[in-house]
Image: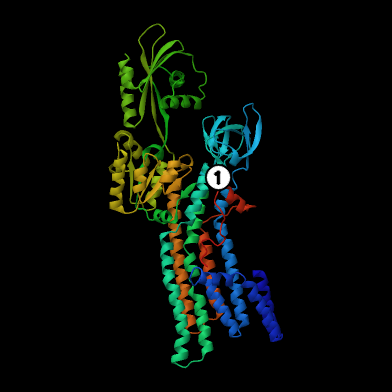
Amino acid sequence: MVLFSGLCLGLGMLGEWLGWPETATTAIFLLAILAGAMEIVPKGLQGVVRERSLDINFLVTVAVAGAMLLGQWGEGATVVFLFSLGEALESYTLGRTRRSIQALMAMAPETAQVKGAGGGERTLRVESVPAGSIVAVRPGDRVPLDGVITQGESAVDQAPITGESVPVDKGPGDTVYAGTINTTGYLEVRTSRPFTENTLAKIIHLVETAQSEKAPSQRFVERFARVYTPAVVMGAVLLVIVPTLLFNQPLAPWFDRALVLLLVACPCALVISTPVSVVAAIGNASRNGVLIKGGAYLEKAGALRAVAFDKTGTLTRGVPEVQQVVPLNGLARADVLRLAAAAEARSEHPLAQAIVRAARREKLDDLPAVEGFQASAGRGIRATVGGAPVTLGKPAWVEASGVALDGAGVVLAEVARAGHTGVVVARGETDGRPPRVVGVIAIADELRSTAGATVKALRRMGVRRIMLLSGDNVTTAAATAARVGIAPQDVRAELLPEAKLAAIRELVRQHGQVAMVGDGVNDAPALAAATVGIAMGAGGSDTALETADIALVADDLTRLPWVLELSRRAARTIRFNIAFALLTKLVVLGLAALGMASLWLAIAADTGASIVVILNGMRLLGRAPAQPLADVGAARRRYGLGHEDPHAGHAH
């Protein structure tokens, strides 16, 4: 109908230029008005009757009716066409900002291959697969539901959920998420939750909710518009009454000016200046592994002056790994690691598993036979490895077992200064001679490779203070801080949750805008007290999604300065949009009051300003998804999101 309205408008203008009869051109312009006004007039009347508000649809209706009464059929048709064209373009551009959610909806497969007790497979819709089922995922397939791998190894592309650009190697015991892509191997996955509760569904709901929440600047603009629009409408009425009744001026020109003023009155571009920017920025973040739970948090993130990090699971990976193997008393390094891995292979202790993983990474598969395995909880183990007695564990416990640590003292002191945990490996001789220390293995929670770069990036961005708040011991916390570039005076160690909370409150008192970055579980009080709570690894943590204001799904610290910069770009975009919209309104209002603006110029300025602020806001979105969805409505119903109002968030 918009295209038909435009065609009739062009035909009517051509007819006027060629000198067609006035009745013919009037009829053509009337067709253009009727085609373009089919949605405008009902919406305008509905706004007045039901919502008791003067929106742009009502003002356009009044203006076009006035133009027809004045015999300005061409201007009336121009107004209707330009306005309806602007509405169509606005709907299209706003729809693009929502495609981040629509693309997520399309990621989970419709069906899953569920294995039965006899080993056979049957195809079920993913909504019907109960938790605890075993599903088969073949190379190239998307994982249908969240779960844990029970069989098989493969590289899994987790970009849809975490934003990671490189597939992650997965094996038995590893978690996989619905919507991720199995690239190479065959996997069997035990589902951990039903479809509507999986990570993909949670992300969709969070992004949907976040994009509908209003930012502070948006609430301010809407309060301003509620006062501004009626004031300008009253001004339009006075513009007709005062000159005609008090100064005996002719009605027609002042009525025409009042119609122009009415069209300019509704602050469409102003109202839409903030929501389109917020929706675009949140959509961009969600595609890049960052969940922002609302426009308020998006705006706050750009104003941060201080950032506090938890250590374990935030600056570090939260998994102990072997950092160094120091051979002693003539044994080769590989032999020390091989000996320790063989002894620890039966232990479930995290430090033991770190040693076993290190041996596996170095291809030390020819482990000697182990007999007489005995574990002392939290201290160490004794076993016979390759026919020789081996004692392995904490230095004090090994020494208490009758092993002299003289040769290992210097090494253990260096390990302690580095903030690592030292594991002593002692071996006796097969001829009965007493055991001696043959090596020290230094183990530590591995530092994230991006931690130091992230701290530097935050400082470059102007974050005034960066702190480390840790429950770990002072030595370990200080060593970690030194490695990432946090000043010693900004390290707080051995903190209980309430102490972290107190530290955050003090930072807020000193700096105002403060972020706490933690794992979303132990740091929950501090996350809640900070201006912006930022959780790591939300892909597998319900608590992180519920507690934090922003979640770095990919466990990637580099996304932190990225999202802060995105927030600042969004703030700059919103400020420009508001200033541009206000300036445009003021200029056209002035021209209208002076009689220098026509109806079509007023609507062109209004629609043009709206399109400018929309396109400017959409720069925050980045590249739109390449493939459109076939049935967005069905996808929304599948995730329980209900019907989407095509004019949701619409300024008009």
Give the camera-side residue of 591 and 255: 255
- Residue 574 vertical placement versus 318 (above, below): below
Give the camera-side residue of 550 and 384: 550
Q: Quadrant of residue 302?
A: bottom left
State left or right for residue 114 relative to residue 609.
right
| Label 1: element kind | helix
Pointer 1 local density, CA inside 10 Å: few below 14, some 14–19, many at least 20? many
Q: Name the residue under label 1.
A: 160
What residue appears at the point 47 percent right and 53 percent down from the top-left corner?
210
Q: What residue type is labelled 1?
A: Pro
Colour setting? rainbow
Q: Where is residue 348 in the image (x, y as percent from the top left)?
A: 44, 24
Q: Position of residue 334 (x, y in %)?
A: 46, 21
The number of numbered badges drawn on the structure is: 1
Q: Where is residue 273 in the image (x, y as percent from the top left)?
A: 48, 64
Q: Quadrant of residue 387?
A: top left
- Residue 360 vertical placement versus 66 (above, below): above
